[in-house]
Amino acid sequence: MTEYSLFLDNTGENILGNTENKKEINSLYLFNLYYYYYNRGYSNLIITEITNLLVLVFMVFFMIFLVQCVDFKELIDYNTNENISLSHFVNLNNFWHLKHNVFVIISLIVFLGYVIIQLISIYASSKKFWKIRKIYREDLEITTEDLDNLTWNDVSNKIIKYYCEPNLNSYTLALKIMTKENLMISVYDELDKLNKDSLKFNKYPLTKLLEWNFMFCFINPLINRNREIDSKVKIEKKKYYEKVQSNINRIFVLNLLFMPLLLIFMVLYLILQYGEQFYNNPNLIVNRQWSIKSFWKLRYYNELPHSYNSRLDKSGLILKEYGKQFPSRLTETISKFIMFILGSFFLILLLLTFLNENLLINLNITDNKPILWYMGILGGVLTIIKSLIYKNVLYDPEKIMKKLSENIDLKEEWVNDCRNKKIKDKIMKFFPLRAVLLLQECYYLVLTPYILWFILKKEAVIICDYLINSLITHHSINGFINKNSLFVNYNQIKENHKTEKSFDNFQKNYPDWNMSSFLYTQESIYPNNNNIHTQNNNISNSSSNLNSNLNSNLNSIINDNQETTDIFLNRF
């Protein structure tokens, strides 16, 4: 399941959203425009969907082939040196003999049902994005070839220019597209802080399956057919609670029933996906990548995927360099010793094969284990050990940490104490070993039903209350949004550190967006806030020409009623 699931978003009767009137531009419609850009056009988007389905089909039939047709017992017991045909161990006639294998029959029925649903989804997607393609070509005058050369800023400027909507700009576009994602960011930004002692859900690693379950149970019930937050959710809280509980009950049963199938499928997929990579490049085992939980914790509000992925890629390279600043001399010494011993054996075996190439497969060092087998094992081990030895590392953690803090938001004490190994361990938790993440995916797949029933079900009220209380009305956009994603209210921006960093990042990515330059000129609102005044001078000098009467009127409104101020700023 990808982050941008077409199937989950195809809930409206009008697959493009209500866009018959150019002035009514809802979140689903803009999301589809962005999704089209993100996948670089119609052909690539549909081919990607078809390819993903074909990979699934191959996986299922390959699993049936291994279970039904391959005699693993004979393969394992085979110990003679005589040549033998593969057909001796494989019988294709057994492929459809499923009478005595109930598990395979049930799995196949479920799979066929899923394939039918996905085919319907792909068909609906093809119709939907064909219309989006037409909009890009005729209305925005952007061809598929142009998408490879245009940035999202270029595309969004064309969208804004074409629709001429007064409240449509880079900020409101991102706000509409990121409706669901902003809620998830908020959950991993604030919920664990508000309920450190009582909330257990955030203490568990987040896997792909658990992420999807959480979105299905808690986020989707808040979203209407136009991919916007339901305007009645605060009035009908009880209905939302009941929907969440119902979703948890249903998804728990499904996870429990299909857990064996999912586990087998997951293990097989990981072997096929990463087995060849690890075999040809064993040092990938000690490579690191961002965990799913860090993916949400480090993401800024209103940050679109193309910007975020670019920022994470840069940060990952820097974080690898930071990890090398703490080499273990003991580990290096032991690794060099092991490399010397194993390298000596590997060299002797290699020389033997040069002297007589027949020895490569015909000379057994131990029972039924020829030189070729040992050379493969030794080569892989040497590659892994070699990756543990860092060469020519310039020790300057402060410089690397400074570069890292420019890309991701880190605690100030971490930056100031970056030479501390305990701090290093805390930072590297965001970027664990890939092998560890793969094992977590399998292990917590088994635990997912337990987490759903005994953790999420008990904490559902806390999570629901937080999500509902985090909503605020944005008068000029689309009703409710997450309050931390609001960028036109100084009080809200300064109250939350993540919101402030998100705002700064948004300004960096969209320098043409100048709505904030008006807000930053309100010195009388924040007479003691030197940071805002300084930031204002850096962002825009044009704000100095604002009419002084407007300032005095605004100050008057603020002194009378703070709530009125928020409404004014939002509408502006």
Image (spheres, rainbow, N blue to C red):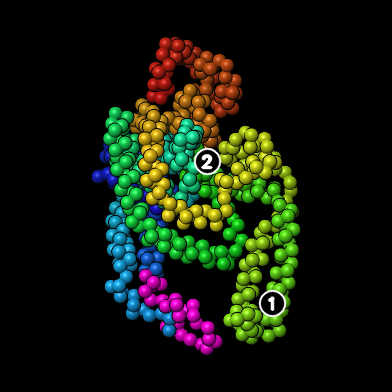
Could one spot residue 509 in this view of the protein?
yes
| First to last magenta residue range | 64-87
Measure the C-alpha gap from mark 1 to mark 2. 48 Å
Q: Position of residue 369 (x, y in %)?
A: 60, 79
Picture quadrant of residue 564 = top left
- The residue where tag 2 is placed is 298
Query: Label 2 is placed on what type of residue?
Result: Leu
* Mark 1 residue type: Leu
Residue for point 70% across, 51% down: 327
Q: Position of residue 235 (x, y in %)?
A: 29, 28
Q: Residues within 10 Å of mark 1 (few under 14, many from 20)?
A: some
- Relative placement, left or right, of 216 versus 412 is left
Q: Is residue 471 inside the magenta stretch?
A: no
**In percent of the image, x 71 and y 52: which residue is there?**
328
The residue where tag 1 is placed is 350
Q: Earlier in the sequence, mark 1 or mark 2?
A: 2
